[in-house]
Amino acid sequence: MIRPLCLLFDCDGTLVDSEPLLAAEMAACLTRLGLPFQASDYIGEFRGSRFRNIVAELEERYGGVDPQQLAETETEMRSNLNRRLETELAAIAGAREALMSLLDYPCGVVSNGPENKIRTSLQAIGFADFFETRLFSGYTANCWKPDPRLYLHAAAAMGFDPEDCVAIDDALVGVKAALDAGMTVIHLNRFPDAEETPEGAIMISSMFQLPTVIENLAHARARESQRQVAIGR
């Protein structure tokens, strides 16, 4: 029997609509540090990027900040964000329906965010049982998208080769990471007028489309396996 495809989901912007909350908290804390930043900057330029990478870019533009003050401000920002996630978070439209349709597939979450943030988000919207402990954080693996090692780490932990994995990610940094990891990549492009799906990735504009795409990939995989058997490989 052919093993089912392993589905690796990004979290923010793919499963949960956390990015507006994150952008607002980030804008408040960075501006206090003297690094001018608006919530729209995150959505427009930095979506999906690691927080410290964003800080480094802003420091290049506006000057450095005190490391101790940065650490304290980041701790405060993450605490405020977690409180908001618990009470204000909503699921991405179609995400619950997609997950319910894909219960037969092994699934994990691969995120640049801290593991406690991933867990808080999934619990807040009732998604935790879909993934249980299969949560893979850049902070735990010590590598962040667009580095492909985070997706490779998740695949290895799930017991799958990269070519047997499908990554579902809304951010270009995540799409690039998964493509470089050698995975099939589905780009949830919720901003098709402003963002171009990279070559090699499959574009969807809604999570409602995901089950059909996954089933098509699974059927194509089964046909290829049958073809290989027929020619004696």
Image (cartoon, rainbow, N blue to C red):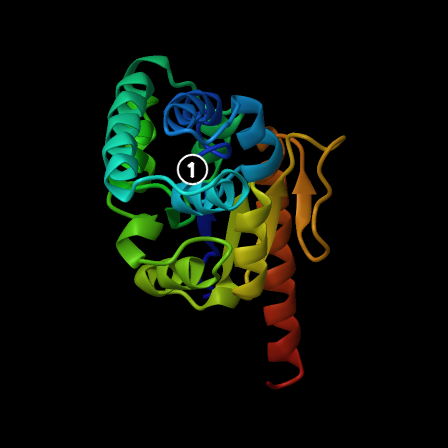
The tally of labels here is 1
Which residue is situated farthest in the front direction here?
63
Residue found at the far top of this picture: 87
Residue drawn where x is 51% and y is 45% of the image: 57
Locate the C terminus and report the quarter of the image it occupies. Answer: bottom right
Outermost residue to the bottom? 232
Q: Determine the residue positioned at 34% across, 30% down.
A: 127
Residue type at mark 1 is Cys
Counting from the top left corner in percent of width and height, residue 217 is at 62, 53
Question: Does 5 appear above or below 63?
Answer: below
Mark 1 nearby-residue class (10 Å; few <14, some 14–19, many ≥20)? many
Mark 1 falls on what kind of element? loop
Residue 2: give x, y in percent of width and height: 48, 65
Q: Which residue is mark 1?
A: 11
Front residue of this view, candidates 62 and 143 = 62
Q: Residue 144, relative to residue 10: is it above or below? A: below
**Closer to the camera, 117 or 233?**
117
Does 101 appear above or below 135? above
Position of residue 78 in the picture relative to residue 24 (left or right)? left
Residue 214 percent location from the top left of the image: 58, 46
Q: Residue at x 48, y 62 (%)?
A: 148
Q: Quadrant of the N terminus?
A: bottom left
User: For the view shown, which residue lies furthest in the right direction?
Assistant: 193
Place residue 76 in its image quadrant.
top left
Front position in the image: 120 or 76: 76
Q: Residue at x 30, y 37 (%)?
A: 70
Q: Position of residue 202 (x, y in %)?
A: 67, 48
